[in-house]
Image (cartoon, rainbow, N blue to C red):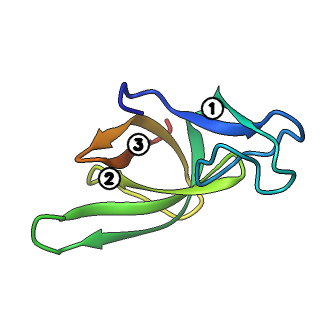
């Protein structure tokens, strides 16, 4: 994440994704390994924040079996639309995800 790459821990035994990220699988307790994931998803819900210092559009995105909350530019959004993670990273020790509508 610090380098802007999106990886998800996946169980080495049963293949389940560990989200939130964890060193061991919650189902079978085997170790996990990082796998590069598809960056596409579906917008489940979104809202606009007017909180000073945190203004913007934020949404919940279903991606490969788990949900992420990410930010969006001021775009025409609708529930169920396909979106793509165009950047991610870590800022002040907090992960962030940014999405754009797929064309």
Residue found farthest to the bottom:
51
Residue 34 sits above or below residue 75 on the image: above
Q: Going 84% across and 39% down the picture, which residue do you hit?
A: 15
Which numbered disc, 1 or 3, marks the residue that appears first in the sequence? Answer: 1
Q: Going 64% across and 30% down the picture, which residue do you hit?
A: 34
Residue 8 sits above or below residue 41 on the image: above
Q: Is residue 21 left or right of residue 47?
A: right
Using the image, tell me which numbered label, if any, was put on residue 37.
1
Which x, y percent locates residue 35?
Answer: 66, 28
Q: Bin the neighbour count of mark 2 within 10 Å (Cα to Cα): few under 14, some 14-19, many 20 and up.
A: few
Q: Going 76% across and 49% down the picture, which residue do you hit?
A: 25
The residue that mark 2 highlights is 75
Q: Quadrant of residue 7?
A: top right
Q: Indicate the secondary structure of the residue bearing disc 1.
A: loop
Q: Are marks 2 and 3 in contact (CB under 8 Å)?
A: yes
Which numbered disc, 2 or 1, marks the residue that appears first in the sequence? Answer: 1
The residue that mark 3 highlights is 100
Q: Indicate the secondary structure of the residue bearing disc 3.
A: strand
Q: Going 23% across and 61% down the picture, which residue do you hit?
A: 56
Residue 70 sits above or below residue 23 on the image: below
Toward the viewer: 103 or 50? 50
Q: CA distance from mark 2 to mark 3?
A: 8 Å
Q: CA distance from mark 1 to mark 3?
A: 17 Å
Residue found farthest to the left:
52
Q: Nearer the viewer, mark 2 or mark 1?
A: 1
Which numbered disc, 2 or 3, marks the residue that appears first in the sequence? Answer: 2
Q: Bin the neighbour count of mark 1 within 10 Å (Cα to Cα): few under 14, some 14-19, many 20 and up.
A: few
């Amino acid at each position: 994440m610090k380098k802007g790459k999106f990886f998800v821990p996946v169980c080495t035994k049963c293949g389940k994704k560990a989200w939130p990220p964890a060193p061991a699988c919650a189902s079978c307790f085997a170790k996990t390994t990082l796998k590069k994931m598809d960056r596409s998803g579906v917008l489940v819900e979104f809202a606009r924040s007017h909180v000073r210092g945190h203004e913007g559009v934020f949404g919940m995105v279903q991606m490969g079996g788990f949900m992420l909350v990410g930010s969006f530019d001021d775009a025409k959004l609708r529930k169920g639309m396909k979106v793509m993670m165009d950047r991610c990273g870590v800022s002040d020790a907090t992960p962030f995800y940014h999405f754009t509508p797929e064309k």
